[in-house]
Image (spheres, helix red, strand yellow):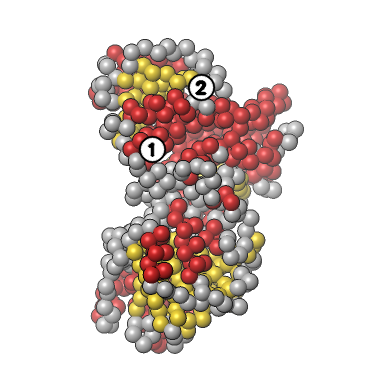
């Protein structure tokens, strides 16, 4: 999704802006641009990659000691140079704006501003902000006040950064529903939508709150909040030292971030479960200091998430019901937020998100609270995210930054965290004997090694991938707790290889999808040696009998033999509750190798963004 960087410093800020944009590239975007101020506003924009912007900036020798920059993921108006940010307004009072999020009342505002004589040159909602701020600036002659007055009129969730030609020594930023933070550096002050954009210049960050507007110059900053006073009341916000790892964002010896992230999974899972490895027993405190009290008041769970994180929630539902005996509902966040569900105050609401910035998940969680749910838990990979700040309890998946748009290590670390949650709740509800708890701790300690062993099948998967590259469709089958893993496998394949893939609970085949099966339809099946294996084998027979080509990921002890049109890759012996995590790895590898063969943009698949910060 869109990314923002702003800077005011002693020296030329162009390198800081460009470095910041490069670090935000992983979020997904289709155009990029910047404005720097040096007597006049110098704007450079392109529909290409940030690398293209770097070239243009160099050619045009753009420089200045204040600037704003942006990567745009198109919402209003096609990806084009004309629609790329920054947008500008005004002649005498020329200002430039970059913006993340959506202005919901942009049509009405556009009409009003056009009636006032403002000319629009783009299709974006952002241009409304530029003209509105210019309009208020004419009246107030103070950019901070003009921004405050403008946001009082704008509806939607957004973050903006604004600068003014006649005051090239400062930038104004505002947050309303979309993430924005300040970076306080030695050489200047900065703003960005994501802490990783500023790591080269500072680790001292201020996370702005809803309604905050801040003015930054190279030595100072001040923040006002406009929620209750349209001209802003001065507020203090705490400075945090970011502990994001700088190196974690480098690609190292890998060809793609996704590849790196797949192979990082043993370490990512180990980091996530570190606290358990040295413990003699499992404690609810792992989820927060008030977890024991909250968990003992909890009689059921409601999981809210999107995409891959939703699939993690579906796996957790099986675990929570089977191991902890707890009722659990899992809802797609974008659906839940517009339903009229009945709240149970004793239901713990769990938001799962890699980024912690997914707009639908954040909104669904707020909605759940509004409906009367009292307690919430975040399972999230970004310590400094909105989700983490929105919940009573939290558990960090310590996967490290995930750059590839296709989520891999975030998913397996979410599963590891959810298994830990299951075991914790089971223990508190006396569903887990001391002996069983010890077995679970042992199993969790073994998980990183087990993940490592699943990675060993890569060469065999790569051979299969060659056969998939020619295909247009694929089916994925699983049963029980492995059905959501089949869904995740299908999502991975479609998002990076653009092959149409669907997952079915294998028992559903004969209720319709079997009609699709012929020799052109590869059918991928997950065949763990669990209590449903016998049933699954019958479902595979149904496919085989109709000339379908089966690709089966089986446990070593699943006793499925290769035959014509039935290919088998064997993992280790059945791993009990850990099995869904281990069966995920070959599916990630399959999607990765098919995408490699097809030559698609593995880390930045078309039309997708890493953090979906708009509805
Ligand atoms: C998965 O590969 C995706 N790119 C996507 O489905 C993602 O999981 C979803 O957008 C939710 O993101 P989050 O975990 O950051 O909330």
User: Which residue is located at x 35 percent, y 20 percent?
Assistant: 550
The outermost residue toward the front is 59
In the shown orientation, is residue 118 left or right of residue 227? left
Query: Is residue 134 depicted above or below 440 in this figure?
Result: below
Identify the disc placed on residue 116: none
CA gap between label 2 and label 1 equals: 23 Å
For mark 1, does the 10 Å Cα neighbourhood hold few (<14), some (14 to 19), or many (20 or more) residues?
Answer: some
Instruction: Find out whether the residues at labels 2 and 1 contact each other: C-beta distance under 8 Å.
Output: no
Q: Quarter of the image holding residue 462? A: top left
Q: Where does residue 453 sit, x and y in percent of width and height?
A: 56, 27
Query: Is residue 111 depicted above or below 318 in this figure?
Result: below
Q: Which residue is mark 2?
A: 571
Q: Quarter of the image holding residue 497? A: top left
Residue 259 vs residue 129, the one in the foreground: 259
Quadrant location of the N terminus in the rendered image: bottom left
Residue 344 appears in the figure: no
Provide the secondary structure element on which disc 2 rests: loop
Provide the secondary structure element on which disc 1 rests: helix
Q: Where does residue 600 sit, x and y in percent of width and height?
A: 35, 43
Identify the disc placed on residue 596: 1
User: Which residue is located at x 55 percent, y 37 percent?
Assistant: 265
Residue 112 appears in the figure: yes
User: Which residue is located at x 46 percent, y 27 percent?
Assistant: 459
Q: Where does residue 353 sit, x and y in percent of width and height?
A: 50, 47
**Disc nearer the start of the sequence (2/1):** 2
Query: Is residue 575 depicted above or below 215 in this figure?
Result: above
């Amino acid at each position: 999704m869109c990314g923002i960087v702003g800077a005011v410093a002693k020296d030329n800020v162009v390198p800081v802006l460009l470095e910041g944009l490069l670090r935000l590239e992983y979020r997904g975007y289709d155009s990029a641009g910047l404005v720097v101020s040096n007597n006049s506003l110098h704007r450079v924009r392109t529909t290409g990659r940030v690398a293209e912007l770097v070239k243009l900036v160099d050619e045009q020798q753009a420089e200045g000691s204040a600037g704003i920059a942006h990567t745009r993921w198109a919402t209003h108006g096609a990806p084009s140079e004309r629609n790329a940010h920054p947008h500008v307004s005004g002649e005498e009072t020329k200002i430039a704006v970059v913006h993340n999020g959506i202005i919901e009342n942009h049509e009405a505002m556009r009409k009003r501003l056009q009636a006032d004589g403002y000319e629009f040159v783009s299709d974006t909602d952002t241009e409304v902000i530029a003209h509105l701020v210019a309009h208020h600036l004419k009246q107030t002659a103070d950019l901070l006040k003009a921004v405050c007055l403008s946001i009082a009129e704008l509806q939607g969730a957004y973050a903006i950064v604004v600068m003014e030609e006649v005051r090239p020594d400062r930038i104004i930023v505002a947050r309303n529903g979309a993430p924005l933070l300040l970076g306080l550096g030695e050489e200047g002050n900065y703003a960005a939508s994501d802490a990783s954009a500023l790591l080269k210049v500072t680790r001292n960050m201020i996370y702005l709150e809803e309604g905050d507007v801040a003015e930054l110059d190279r030595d100072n900053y001040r923040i006002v909040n406009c929620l209750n006073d349209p001209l802003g009341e001065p507020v203090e916000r705490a400075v945090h030292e970011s502990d994001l790892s700088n190196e974690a964002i480098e690609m190292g010896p890998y060809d793609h971030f996704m590849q790196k992230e797949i192979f990082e999974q043993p370490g990512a899972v180990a980091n996530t479960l570190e606290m358990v490895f040295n413990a003699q027993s499992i404690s609810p405190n792992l989820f927060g200091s008030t977890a024991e009290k909250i968990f003992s008041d909890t009689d059921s769970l409601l999981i809210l998430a999107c995409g891959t994180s939703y699939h993690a929630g579906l796996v957790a539902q099986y675990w929570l019901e089977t191991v902890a005996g707890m009722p659990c509902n899992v809802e797609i966040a974008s659906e839940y937020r517009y339903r009229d569900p009945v709240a149970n105050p004793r239901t713990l609401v769990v938001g799962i998100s890699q980024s912690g910035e997914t707009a639908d998940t954040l909104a669904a969680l707020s909605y759940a609270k509004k409906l009367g749910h009292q307690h919430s838990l975040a399972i999230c990979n970004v310590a400094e995210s909105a989700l983490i700040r929105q919940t009573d309890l939290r558990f960090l998946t310590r996967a490290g930054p995930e750059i590839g748009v296709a989520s891999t290590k975030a998913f397996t670390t979410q599963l590891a965290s959810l298994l830990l949650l299951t075991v914790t709740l089971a223990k508190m509800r006396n569903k887990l004997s001391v002996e069983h708890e010890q077995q679970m701790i042992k199993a969790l300690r073994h998980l990183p090694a087990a993940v490592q062993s699943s990675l060993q099948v890569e060469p065999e998967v790569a051979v299969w991938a060659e056969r998939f590259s020619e295909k247009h469709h694929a089916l994925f089958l699983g049963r029980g707790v492995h059905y959501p893993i089949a869904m995740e496998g299908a999502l991975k394949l479609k998002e990076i290889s653009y092959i149409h893939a669907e997952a079915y609970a294998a028992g559903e085949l004969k209720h319709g999808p079997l009609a699709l099966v012929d020799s052109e339809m590869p059918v991928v099946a997950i065949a763990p040696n669990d209590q449903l294996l016998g049933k699954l084998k019958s479902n595979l027979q149904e496919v085989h009998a109709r000339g379908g080509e089966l690709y089966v990921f089986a446990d070593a002890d699943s006793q499925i033999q290769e035959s014509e049109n039935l290919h088998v890759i064997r993992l280790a012996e059945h791993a009990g509750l850990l099995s869904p995590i281990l069966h995920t790895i070959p599916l990630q590898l399959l999607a990765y190798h098919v995408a490699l063969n097809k030559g698609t943009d593995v880390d930045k698949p078309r039309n997708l963004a890493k953090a979906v910060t708009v509805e």
